[in-house]
Image (cartoon, rainbow, N blue to C red):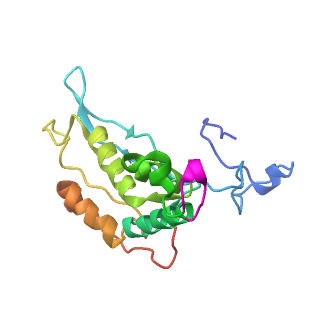
Amino acid sequence: MRDAEGFVVSPTDAEVGGGTGTGARKQTSVKYANEARFCFCVAAPFAKQADGTVKQVGRTAAPFNYTKQWLVGPANFEKEMAKEEARVAAYDGGKEWGIKGQGYVHRYGAAKAREECEKRVLSHHQCATRMVDWLVAAGREIFHGTCDSEGEPLEDDWALNGDGLSSWWDVGTQAYFKDTYPKEYARQVRCSPNFANRY
């Protein structure tokens, strides 16, 4: 639905039921009941325009999609990898899986065994370090060529913040962030991790 000015608005409870009531709905309706999980990167930096003027512009990056995946820190992701390797190693599958204990190495060779195991794990889990990689790449892309309101270059001075996603603030995730992207790590806005509610 749209209001008189054309902006998208939520229908009221009465409107959903066919009536003409007013007032905000008490509960949001969704098209699909299944959960979708994304991380979004948005910003409104200043940038020089073709005519030399400086203008604030809205920018976005392609979202990080981890729908149907449980986002975990690197230690827990490795535990899932070990579980998957053990599951397949228990097979006594002859030509396809080899004798017990061979699993992925027999089927795909030593060079590709981890990659193939990871594909299976990624069907239900995602490592938060991949979100770190995505966020840094997205931030660099969004702020490329930006400046301050006076037109001075500022593309390498952005900060990032988010909510208390426990896997983001996981010790292993933060260690990876610090070691791999020290400049961006130093510019993240800290918040209280939501360890009581694992995502």
Q: Residue furthest top?
A: 51
x, y percent for residue 178 = 22, 62
User: Is residue 82 shown above or below 12?
Assistant: below
Residue 165 visible to an observer of this rendering: no
x, y percent for residue 47 = 24, 34
If the image is split into quadrants, where does the N terminus sit?
top right
Q: Which residue is at 36% across, 69% downward? A: 169
Q: Residue furthest left?
A: 152
Q: Residue furthest bottom?
A: 196
Classify residue 169 as left or right of residue 89: left
Query: In the image, is residue 94 part of the stretch drawn in magenta?
Result: yes
User: Is residue 17 shown above or below 57?
Assistant: below
Which residue occupies the foreground of this view, 59 or 131?
Answer: 131
Q: Which residues are magenta?
A: 90-99
Q: Does the magenta stretch mainly form a helix, a strand or a loop?
A: loop
x, y percent for residue 90 = 56, 65
* Displayed quadrant of residue 141: top left
* Displayed quadrant of residue 98: bottom right
Q: Which residue is at 17% across, 43% downward? A: 154
Q: Which residue is at 59% across, 39% downward? A: 7
Tally the marks.
0
